[in-house]
């Protein structure tokens, strides 16, 4: 699919480039040709006004740039005089053929291709004046221009083709990355759903067997309910991520007292930390207010606290802190004592379905919590990052805060 998309991008781009090159080079040729023709006609008009004062080259005007000659005809079409000095005008047959060719068309000016001449005819009541200018140099100029345009066109086409191929890689890269992430997401989601679904099917089949008593069947039913709840949580998290990815979904923000929200969210977790033998310490600055969605911000804090209680070391300590940073920013930090996170894992913690410790895959964690936390932080115009140093794993969220 990506290759087809790149090919389509290059084809569309090169079609546009080819059309533009043809138009530009065509206009250059047209205006050059028109300019040369206009200059030639302007010269011939000036000559026609006083044709026989230019009998020698020394007497030509400044606007005379092409070899020319002029013929004056009587009312009956008889050749009365010639002038110009650039051609041998003694050949009467040649002059008669030129006169016949000129009067064969009703146009006042035109080109006699077989003679390589342009003519200009002026009719008066008593006589007629014919001015002829050589267009050999004009044609040579246009022929050279055509060759130059062809060379420029071919070189330009190849250059733009090379640039288009490079641009196609750059333009399609986000799509390629999104496609890759989507495939990874589907594969990981399928893997996460496959195990509980297998457990559910196995327990359902065992329940149908008459060899097991009622107590065993209740145990099978409990396993089915547990796995169903696990699948439900996974699907809810995936739906939440899908909603956060939808650019059209707009969250309505209101003023939220983040200090109170953090304190209230920590309270239910105190018993959880106590049961696991963890020491919880809170340091929340008062009157920190932000513009946001209270439900999402609460979920953000819960994700960080849940992550801390899962990965903190035995009898370790957990710290929750909220502090202002300057006048317009605040930072929420949840840190825990635990096994140090490798640098390569720190770069992947916020990827979907990523777990730094794969052995905990069946602990109820699907590797989506930190991805949801990141999406919430981004929606609130903030950022989230992780640090691990000296046995302390620290997750920090920076958000814009409201002035008191």
Image (cartoon, rainbow, N blue to C red):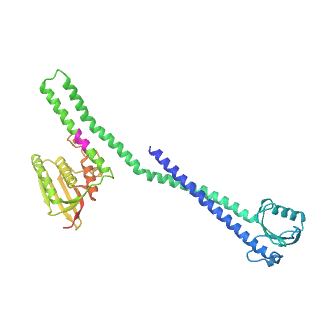
Of all residues, the one furthest to the top in this rendering is 211
Count every numbered label the image shows and give the total: 0
Residue, x 29% and y 40% (percent of image)?
A: 189
Whole-percent x and y of residue 130? 81, 69
In which image quadrant can residue 110 be found?
bottom right
Whole-percent x and y of residue 291? 23, 60
Image quadrant holding the C terminus, namely: bottom left
Whole-percent x and y of residue 373? 24, 52
**Most foreground residue, 202 or 102:** 102
- Position of 136 with respect to 214 (left or right) is right
Residue, x 12% and y 56% (percent of image)?
A: 281
- Position of 144 with respect to 182 (left or right) is right
- The magenta region covers 231-236
Magenta-colored stretch includes residue 163: no
**Most foreground residue, 364 or 107:** 107
Instruction: Examine the rendered structure and indicate whether residue 247 appears above or below residue 84.
Output: above
Residue, x 67% and y 58% (percent of image)?
A: 147
**Most foreground residue, 80 or 191:** 80
Image quadrant holding the N terminus, namely: top left
- Position of 245 with respect to 303 (left or right) is right
**Main SS category, magenta section:** helix
Whole-percent x and y of residue 77? 87, 67
In which image quadrant can residue 85 be found?
bottom right
Residue, x 83% and y 70% (percent of image)?
A: 128
Is residue 392 visible in the rendered structure shown here?
no
Is residue 97 visible in the rendered structure shown here?
yes
């Amino acid at each position: 699919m990506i290759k087809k998309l790149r090919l389509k991008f290059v084809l569309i781009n090169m079609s546009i480039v080819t059309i533009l090159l043809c138009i530009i080079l065509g206009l250059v040729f047209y205006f050059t040709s028109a300019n040369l023709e206009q200059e030639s006609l302007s010269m011939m008009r000036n000559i026609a006004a006083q044709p026989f004062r230019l009998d020698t080259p020394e007497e030509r005007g400044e606007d005379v740039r092409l070899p020319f000659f002029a013929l004056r005809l009587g009312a009956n079409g008889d050749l009365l005089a010639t002038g110009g000095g650039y051609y041998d005008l003694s050949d009467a047959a040649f002059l008669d053929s030129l006169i016949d060719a000129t009067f064969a068309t009703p146009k006042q000016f035109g080109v006699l291709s077989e003679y390589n001449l342009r003519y200009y005819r002026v009719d008066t009541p008593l006589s007629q004046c014919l001015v002829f200018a050589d267009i050999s140099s004009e044609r040579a100029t246009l022929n050279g221009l055509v060759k130059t345009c062809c060379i420029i066109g071919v070189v330009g086409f190849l250059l733009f083709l090379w640039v288009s191929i490079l641009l196609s890689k750059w333009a399609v890269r986000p799509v390629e990355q999104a496609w890759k992430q989507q495939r990874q997401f589907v594969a990981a989601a399928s893997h996460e759903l496959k195990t509980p679904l297998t457990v559910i099917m196995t327990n359902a089949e065992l329940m149908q067997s008459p060899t097991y008593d009622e107590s065993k069947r209740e145990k099978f039913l409990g396993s089915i309910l547990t796995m169903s709840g696990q699948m439900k949580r996974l699907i809810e998290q995936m739906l939440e991520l899908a909603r956060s990815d939808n650019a059209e979904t707009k969250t309505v923000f209101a003023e939220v007292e983040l200090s109170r929200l953090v304190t209230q969210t920590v309270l239910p977790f105190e018993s959880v930390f106590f049961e696991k033998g963890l020491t919880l310490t809170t340091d929340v600055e008062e009157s920190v207010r932000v513009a946001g969605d209270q439900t999402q911000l609460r979920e953000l804090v819960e994700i960080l606290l849940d992550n801390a209680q899962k990965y903190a070391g035995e009898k370790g300590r957990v710290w929750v802190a909220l502090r202002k940073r300057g006048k317009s920013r605040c930072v929420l930090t949840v840190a825990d004592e635990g096994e140090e996170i490798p640098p390569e894992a720190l770069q992947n913690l916020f990827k979907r379905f990523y777990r730094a410790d794969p052995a905990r895959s069946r602990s109820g964690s699907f590797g989506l919590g930190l991805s949801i936390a990141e999406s919430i932080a981004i929606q609130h115009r903030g950022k989230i990052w992780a640090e691990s140093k000296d046995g302390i794993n620290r997750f920090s969220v920076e958000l814009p805060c409201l002035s008191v």
